[in-house]
Amino acid sequence: MSAHAASRSVAVPHRRVADRARAGRTVRAGRGFSVRVQGRTLTVCLGLLVALVAVVAVSLTTGDYPISVPEVLKTLAGQGRRADEFIVLGLRLPRVATGLLVGFALGVAGAVFQLVTRNPLGSPDVIGFTSGAVTGALVVLLVLGGGGWQTSFGALVGGGVTAIAVYLLSTRGGVQGYRLILVGIGVSAVLQAANSYLLTRSRVEDAQAATVWITGSLNGRGWEQATPVGVGLALLLPVLLLSGRSLTVLDLGDDAARALGVDVARTRLVVLVAATALTALAAMAAGPIAFVALAAPQIARRLTRAVGSGLVAAGLTGALVLLVSDLTAQRLFAPTQLPVGVVTGAVGGVYLAWLLVTQWRRGRG
């Protein structure tokens, strides 16, 4: 490439970044901190928050034991009846909180992976991290005979080990998006074969119990599952938000990002570690819930029509998708309650087919 062409190729991303920078308004807090706020993104986030409040209200007030909104508020204030306290504080609220936090974590993690790989298919579901979490859980359940928290810990370890393996296998002269996805798909195929082998070699009772877990469910989830995900978000979300500007520049390509002063390798490693930890924590709390991390960032991006990382919008969308799916799983075939992974898998399968057709047409266009 000639010097003129090289300078022109860098100048174009510069103009794109400048255009992105001009979109929205800068809000400053003190001398050292400022954030760029785009009006449409802020409106969409507020709309998602309102929708989340509505879904949470429906989840807390309806079911086999209906409770009015005023009674729920009295119970939350510590003035409710004992039966209401058991239903709201002991059963429904922990489940809703777990779904809210797990959905938010998956949405944020999916947005990070799709930005790093610069591909809408680059989600933890597709590139093997979820399969690794399942393998870790199955090893604990079926081989070591572990119980509840041991299974969750096994999922955490399995997801983490898989992430390290995919990253190392993809690192050849730097991590490239397509290479990461292809390596992840290959690793996922191997792990799925291992998972099938573990299920076929186990007793029928153990296989049934394991199948329920690997489908992904919020049934019976309590504060012991919600708390680790909440702590993880409190620690890791600020790291990802502070990396949001570098993630936006990475979307322009490695060469342009380096030309604009971004430490590509360091930024990519930091955000991938944080996103992998969020994915593993979500799997530890609710099992491998399919397609939320894949679909939520794309839905959020289409709603906001904004450039940039869009992590908050993706997280809110993920939380809304998961809570609506869980409500559907509870009410659709009542009194039988389906695992939420059945609903997200059915909806996500249709979405994935639409996404593949769209990408194929775009490639031919």
Image (cartoon, rainbow, N blue to C red):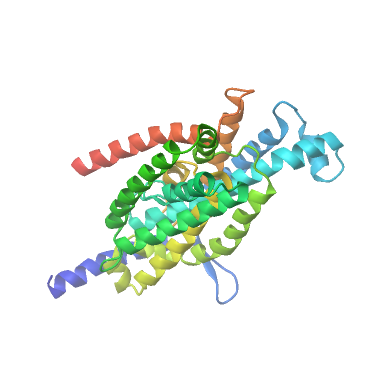
79 on left or right of 35: right
| Residue 364: x %, y % from top left | 19, 41
Q: Who is closer to the viewer here, 278 or 251?
A: 278
Location of the C terminus (image quadrant): top left
Total marks shown come to 0
| Residue 211: x %, y % from top left | 50, 36
179 on left or right of 43: left
Q: Which residue is located at x 58 percent, y 35 percent?
A: 326
Location of the N terminus (image quadrant): bottom left
Q: Who is closer to the viewer here, 69 or 13?
A: 69
| Residue 234: x %, y % from top left | 60, 61
Q: Who is closer to the viewer here, 153 or 19?
A: 153
Q: Which residue is located at x 79 percent, y 38 percent?
A: 86
The image quarter containing residue 232 is: bottom right
The image quarter containing residue 357 is: top left
For this orientation, the residue located farthest to the bottom is 31
Q: Is residue 365 visible?
A: no
290 on left or right of 185: right
Q: Is residue 336 visible?
A: yes
Q: Which residue is located at x 45 percent, y 33 percent?
A: 347
| Residue 327: x %, y % from top left | 60, 32
276 on left or right of 183: right
Above-or-below relation of 231 to 43: below
